[in-house]
Image: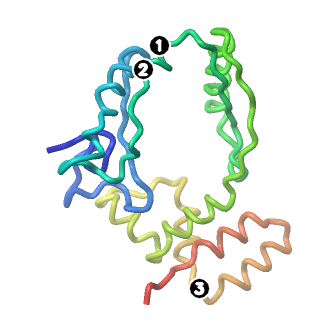
Amino acid sequence: PVGPLSSRGVRVPRPRDRNGQEHVRSSAGPMARCVDDLELLMAAWCQPDLWTGPRGDPKVPPVPWRSHIYLSDRKLKFGYYVFDGFFHAAPTCVRAVQMAVDELKAAGHEVVPIQVDFYDVLLSYIGIMSAEGNMQGFIDGLEGEELLPMYSFLYRIASMPNLVRAPLAAVVRALGQPRMADLMISGRKKSVY
């Protein structure tokens, strides 16, 4: 049995039922043709039996769908960002966000830019992804597919011998590349022993 929004939910079937990592949950959707279809889906998914009872999933937050908010004529306030403190968004993503901002404003909602800083979060993510060394869990998850070129830099960082990390990071930092130096340190292999 498969229940939506959970570790048992909507996802791509994988060998040994692996879908993402335990610490970085993957999610496969949903997609719809209109907002009303998404509202109907969320109302069906966000039911108390999803997180309670014998088939409940403790990984799903116990938050019921609140249709009255969706159906209300009350104007809402939205925050948005296009820079996460580490990576600048691609121009197409910036354009998509701006289009959404324009539509929300045109509908009478208040839309404000917010400042976020996920720098430390990203370094933690890199640390988690590289913990096994050589991004092994990530590579295993590809099931023989080639690593996308955009990940080759992270793969090189994860594959770097720990012995050279600190000295090389110090040189890179001195050359004015603090983000690169932080990635080198975060991407080291870690042991649980």
Under circle 2, the secondary element is helix
Task: Describe residue 46's horizontal placement relative to residue 16 as left or right.
Answer: right
Residue 42 found in image quarter: top left
Amino acid type assigned to the residue bearing label 3 in the image: Asn
Task: Describe residue 75's horizontal placement relative to residue 45 as left or right.
Answer: right
Which one is nearer the viewer's eye here, 47 or 185? 47
Which badge, 3 or 2, comes first in the chain's sequence?
2
Task: Describe residue 122's horizontal placement relative to residue 146 as left or right.
Answer: right
**Which labelled disc corresponds to residue 67?**
2
Which one is nearer the viewer's eye here, 162 or 119? 119
Task: Describe residue 135's horizontal placement relative to residue 19 as left or right.
Answer: right
Amino acid type assigned to the residue bearing label 1 in the image: Leu
Which badge, 3 or 1, comes first in the chain's sequence?
1
Q: Position of residue 78 (x, y in %)?
A: 65, 27
- Residue 80 to residue 147: above or below: above
Q: Quadrant of the C terminus?
A: bottom left
**Which labelled disc corresponds to residue 71?**
1
Residue drawn at x 47%, y 74% as measured from the top left: 134
Q: Position of residue 188 (x, y in %)?
A: 57, 78
Label 1 and label 2: CA atoms lie apart by 6 Å
Q: Position of residue 5 (x, y in %)?
A: 33, 41
Under circle 3, the secondary element is helix
Label 3 and label 2: CA atoms lie apart by 52 Å
Residue drawn at x 39%, y 20% as measured from the top left: 39
Residue drawn at x 25%, y 39% as measured from the top left: 49
Task: Look at discs 3 and 2 and give the one toward the viewer.
Answer: 2
Which one is nearer the viewer's eye here, 5 or 101? 5
Under circle 1, the secondary element is helix
- The residue under label 3 is 162
Q: Quadrant of the N terminus?
A: top left
Pointers 1 and 2 in contact (CB under 8 A)?
yes
